[in-house]
Image (cartoon, rainbow, N blue to C red):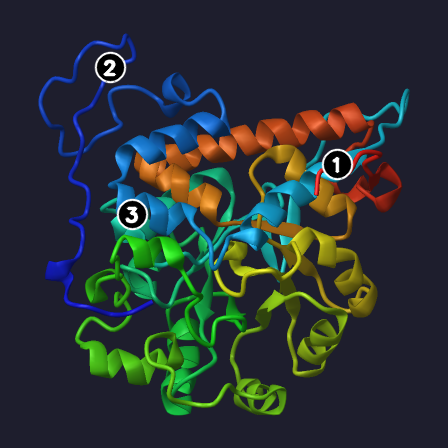
Amino acid sequence: MTATDASTQAEIPPARPTRPPDGTAPTGTDPSPFVSFTSADRFATVGEIYEEARRALPPQVWDFLDGGSGGEQTLRANLSSFERWSVLPRLMTGAGEPDLACAFLGIELSMPVLTSPFGADRLLHRDGQLAVARANAKAGVASIVPEAGSYSWEEVATAAPGAARMAQLHPMGNPANFAAMLRRAAAAGFSALCLTLDCPTAGWRERNMRNRFDVAVDVVSGNYPHAGPADLADTLGQLFVRREPIWTWDELAGRMADSPLPWMAKGILTGSDAEAAVLAGAAAVLVSNHGGRQLDTVPAALDQLPEVVAAVGGRVPIALDSGIRRGSDVVKALALGADVVVIGRAAAMALAAGGEEGVGRLHELLREEISTTIKLLGASGVDELTDTMIRPSAVSRW
């Protein structure tokens, strides 16, 4: 990611006219779109949300959102990984209505879902993570609020205090700024931290290169409103300008020793790194390859989940992201040992497609499919999902 002057970027999409549910032409430009009908009238499936996001966004912004790094091998692997697992139902179990509620790092959730800390969010919708957090609060879902977002942590926390529960940070750059941000997250009322460990610099994004697309400073500097490119290079470190060494596990452990909040290590793909994170003090690990947007050709996150589960051995809870597109994907991840999932690209697509209402509709669809899948498996809730209910598919689609 390269910070450039905002004037060289694609304009943030303006408010679009509201289209009534009967399909008639829009009438005027409503300053608060998506209010004359519910998202359920528009989005029958998650696939329809993606289709609307593509229509809504300028092509270069769509590529920024939809694309991955390098040849996008990992991006494709994330999606196909869920197809390589089949579920095994149990019959006549007497199970009742599934209970989807759970807790993660002390955060109560109505279903085992959080939204990821995707930044540059105002490129997708003018309300960005504010809209995501408001939808999450209504759905009982938690937001991981980005450091490099369009709005500050405090703005998102004020917009939806019930959902803005985790603040995301990059452990890099100036240690003094990092320590100040730890204190700032606690002061803003967050319950936990998410440290993104797999992003010492931005991935090799060829779609962005072809489009000559750089992310403007103003959509990633919500937490640093007075910072210019030089300041951001200091505060966000190598994310913009790689000029400092990557921190070591010992350095991270030392800098987190006095953290007022528990923290989750994001970007874990191996058992050895999971072990190192736990020894460094992580209260949770997030199995993730950054949605295929960082280092290409790494394995799908789901494929690495069993290794991480074995290494952690129940000492800390485990989250998984990368490739989740539907409720049955969530169930498969939980059956393989994840405690919760984190949705990134799906939530960003829903934001682009319909703002707060689009994200809310995504949650409805996920909840309904998770519940239906658990019912069909013969289970009573997410706590009954185990690896006895899942096995590799007979026909690999790799």
Q: Tag 3, which secondary structure?
A: helix
Q: Amino acid at mark 2?
A: Pro
> Disc 3 and disc 1: Cα gap in Å?
39 Å
* Residue 96 visible in the current orientation: no
Nearest to the eye among marks 2 and 3: give it.
Answer: 3
Nearest to the eye among marks 2 and 1: give it.
Answer: 2
Q: Amino acid at mark 3?
A: Val
x and y, in percent, of residue 206 in the image: 39, 57
Which residue position holds label 1?
381
Could you say which disc has been placed on residue 20 in the image?
2
x and y, in percent, of residue 10 in the image: 18, 51
The answer to whether mark 2 and mark 3 are in CB contact below 8 A is no
x and y, in percent, of residue 294 in the image: 49, 64
Label 3: how many residues lie within 10 Å, few (<14), some (14-19) or many (20+)? many
Q: Is residue 74 left or right of residue 36?
A: right
* Residue 7 visible in the current orientation: yes
Q: Tag 1, which secondary structure?
A: loop
- Look at 63% across and 54% down and name the residue there: 320
Q: Report the quarter where the C terminus lies.
A: top right
Measured along the vertical axis of the image, is residue 182 above or below residue 271?
Answer: below
- Look at 46% across and 46% down and name the residue there: 345
* Quadrant in the picture for residue 20: top left
Could you say which disc has been placed on residue 61 in the image?
3
Q: Amino acid at mark 1?
A: Gly
Q: Is residue 125 left or right of residue 294?
A: left
Q: Earlier in the sequence, mark 2 or mark 1?
A: 2
Label 2: how many residues lie within 10 Å, few (<14), some (14-19) or many (20+)? some
> Disc 2 and disc 3: Cα gap in Å?
26 Å
Number of residue marks? 3
Nearest to the eye among marks 3 and 1: give it.
Answer: 3
